[in-house]
Structures are given as C-alpha cells and as structure tokens.
Image (tube, rainbow, N blue to C red):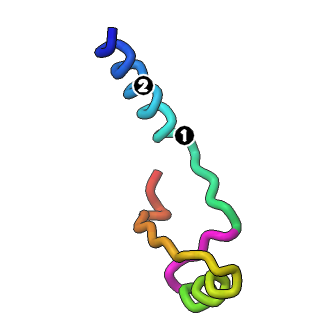
C-alpha cells in the first residue's frame, strides 16, 4: 500500500512539473540584482537565488 501511494504521488508530481509555471512579479533576473538587493533590504527579507533556463520548454 505504501508503494502504491508513493507511486501515485510521483506520477502527480511529474504531471505538475510539465505544467506551465507563472513567475511572480517580485522575481528578478540576475541583471536586476541591485534592484533585488535594495528591495530585500527595504523589506528586511532574505535573497534567494534560483538558477533556471527561461528558454526551456
């Protein structure tokens, strides 16, 4: 039973990975790093880096 539930969760996650992902407005590209740093300092929030290929399909 545990194997089947893991298999179902794995298949669902693979399906969701192929779905389109909408990037929020507060996400900045690397070229806007200074703007992102200033915004993070202003809001006292940490910065996180995510490496991705925006041209992937």
- Indicate whether 23 appears above or below 32: above
Q: Nearer the viewer, mark 2 or mark 1?
A: 2
Q: Pointer 1: what residue?
A: 19
Query: Main SS type for the magenta part?
Result: loop
From the viewer's side, name the closer residue of 37 and 24: 37
Task: Measure the C-alpha gap from mark 2 to mark 1.
Answer: 16 Å
Classify mark 1: residues with Cα within 10 Å, few (<14), some (14-19) or many (20+): few
- Snapshot quadrant of residue 39: bottom right
List x then y, in percent, for residue 31: 53, 85
Q: Residue at the spot x=64%, y=80% of the render? A: 44
Q: Residue at the spot x=42%, y=25% of the render? A: 9
List x then y, in percent, for residue 15: 47, 31
Q: Pointer 2: what residue?
A: 9
- Snapshot quadrant of residue 28: bottom right
Magenta-highlighted residues: 26-31
Mark 1 lies on a secondary structure that is loop
């Amino acid at each position: 039973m545990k194997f089947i539930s893991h298999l179902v969760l794995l298949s669902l996650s693979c399906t969701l990975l192929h779905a389109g992902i909408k990037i929020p407005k507060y996400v900045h590209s690397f070229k806007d790093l200074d703007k992102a740093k200033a915004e993070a300092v202003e809001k006292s929030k940490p910065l996180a880096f995510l490496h991705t290929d925006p041209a992937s399909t």
